[in-house]
Image: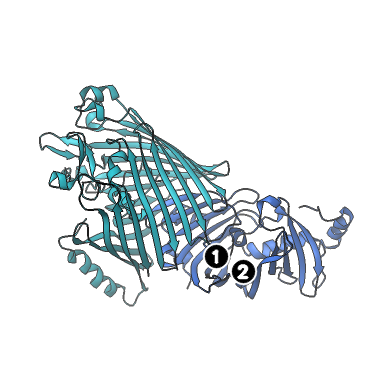
Amino acid sequence: MIGVRRPWRWIAPVLVVWPVVAAGQEPVEIHGFGEAAVAGRFLENPVIADDFALAEARFRLDVSHFTDFAELSFKGDLIADDVIGDVEIDIRQAVITMHLSQWLDVRAGRQVLTWGTGDLVFLNDLFPKDFVSFFVGRDDEFLKAPSNSVKFSVYPRPASLDVVWTPVFTPDRYITGVRLSYFDASVPGLVSAESMGQPLTAALPPRTLGNGEFAGRLYRTFGGYELALYGHVGFTKRPLAFDPTLDTATFARLGAYGASVRGAVAGGIGNAEGSYYDSWDDRSGTDPNVPNSEVRGLLGYERELLANFTLGLQYYLQWTLGYDQLIANSPAPQFEPDELRHTFTLRTTYRFRRETMILSLFAFVSPSDRDTHLRPSFTYAWSDAVRLDLGANIMAGNESGFFGQLEESSNIYGRLRYSY
Amino acid sequence: MRYHRLPTMVAVTALTLTARPSIGQDLSDVDEIVQRANLATYYAGDDGRAGVRMTITDAQGRERIRQFAILRRDVADGGDQDYALLFSRPADVRNTVFLVTKHVGADDDRWLYLPSLDLVRRIAAGDRRTSFVGSHFVYEDVSGRGVEEDTHELVETTDAFYVVQNTPIDAGSVEFSSWTVWIDKDTFLPIKVEYVDEGGEVYRRIEALQVAEFGGHPTVTTMQVSDLRSGGTTVSEVRDVEYDLGIPESVFTERTLRSPPRQWFSVR
């Protein structure tokens, strides 16, 4: 998280300058929430003694200001974190949006970015995610992590175009062994920050202009069907590569190119998305320290089956190219995932009591990784301001699978939020 | 148009007599009444803007507020429409945008933008009889029920109202067995609507409590829906109503979902 060491550097300009600038103009809108959250592991974890994956109080400040030509928006969280034993600041948004003309918007600053058609599955969206938050019971909002980016949105007649430049590569907030233990093939076995003596660290690419990330999306709606083309040039968002000279995990060069379509199908919504992941530094697939190129595909369908009861299904394929070379060169071929990785997801949502109560289950099931992840949840909006969330993250299966490695990190969680 | 409930003779006669109704002369063609009520309620002007505040009160007296600005643009009178809603209250749905392309005789296209995730979700065309944003209104109350989905019968003409009883053609698709509407003879606005269940009991009522005129278009500004079974109510208050603003088609696109144009959504 940024600004932990000198949080006043972030807070001072916002708290002092902004209201002064805004005084006498359009009103400044101030909102946010306070939230207490706790998640407890319910299985014995051999490498983490702390039973709590989450124990934190979070205070959100959300300030926005609109003028005729620009919108300023700030969202920051102050977190008293009892797992880390520290107070942290996480700036989720500090952005200025300018409508420069009829056909051009620019949005610059720290921001959360999302595109693509998947439901909790991302192919062409290579903006940073926070998988730690995702597995320890924080709100779904925290699955997306912010990046410092400039987004140009161009709206000429035939189609719309987004171009995002992230000057400094921003990786996912990946699993480091602090709240969640993970499988390390070199052990082989389950490890954590506790068992390793330190969290997993990875070497970031040098901070050069050439190592910035570019992402683009060209999209258009034809008769209710949304079509989009995507491109992303940057690095893998998780440290999937290994640098033997530094003896550390690192990020590999990646280009991703894809397309998607979404629209009404048989009384519901259908979507299809595909992407080609071009691993620039290992196109032949022979280098065991760099991930291979991949083709990814997604098919999804969602429909309201009964009043207030929605069912969503997805099939997600990850096809590793040059698989024979990967196995031939891998130091631990027995732990490599299958050439074709299949994942099915299911989402059921039931809203009742005038939408003040929501029962939901999201399930990932991977026959090829032989693992699963279940996300049951219950939300109760006691009033407009007060909301209670209860749920669980249940992971199970094959120890080296993406979800299976987290089995001993399975948890139940509760969150109480007051919004203002 | 369907004439299921009308003997052909009567229908033909009614059409002839009411082709050009003069002021003060009662209409007797129920389909014309229903059509004009539909246009007056949902198609005033070529486009429109309003600020809406819904106060939802449950049987225990607990209140919830839903506040949003709404933009509407007609593709054709009585036909397809575009809607865009920008929520300002409650705090946890602030800046959520809801975009609907209403198709007459087909499923609507619906999108929702969740600002905290920067996520544009496509929403499956759902049951139009389910709660609108947690209120006692249903989606159909907001964007209109297709006139072709019911058979209509003019059961009474009073000094002030045409009283029309509507019976669904596909009874399995709705929770009521019929609904009766009191249509103002001057403005053609529905002033009272009552929904009757299979047992013949009125279980749901919508009342127009206040009507005002904006740009020559009479408009219901305060409306209450009562759930007579549970005792809950929702009161919808509409303000800053404006018609014929010339809202361009381009406002009803993904750009508006991700970056709602304040000049169109600005209501006081």
Per the image, label 2 sits on a secondary structure element best described as: strand
> How many numbered dots are placed on residues in this image?
2
Closest to the observer: A210 or B222? Answer: B222
User: Label 1, on which residue?
Assistant: B135
- The spot of residue A176 in percent (x, y) is 21, 46
Residue A134 visible in this rendered orientation of the protein:
yes
Q: Amino acid at mark 1?
A: Ser
Mark 2 vs 1: CB contact within 8 A: yes
Q: Quadrant of residue B228?
A: bottom right
- The spot of residue B100 in percent (x, y) is 54, 54
Which residue shows up at 23% across the image and 46% down it?
A: A169
Q: Amino acid at mark 2?
A: Val
Per the image, label 1 sits on a secondary structure element best described as: loop
- The spot of residue A368 in percent (x, y) is 36, 31
Q: Earlier in the sequence, mark 2 or mark 1?
A: 1
Instruction: Specify the farthest residue to the left.
Output: A245
The letter of the blue chain is B
- Vertical relation: A303 (above or below) A371: below
Which residue shows up at 47% across the image and 56% down it?
A: A358
User: Label 2, on which residue?
Assistant: B225
Q: Colour of chain A?
A: cyan
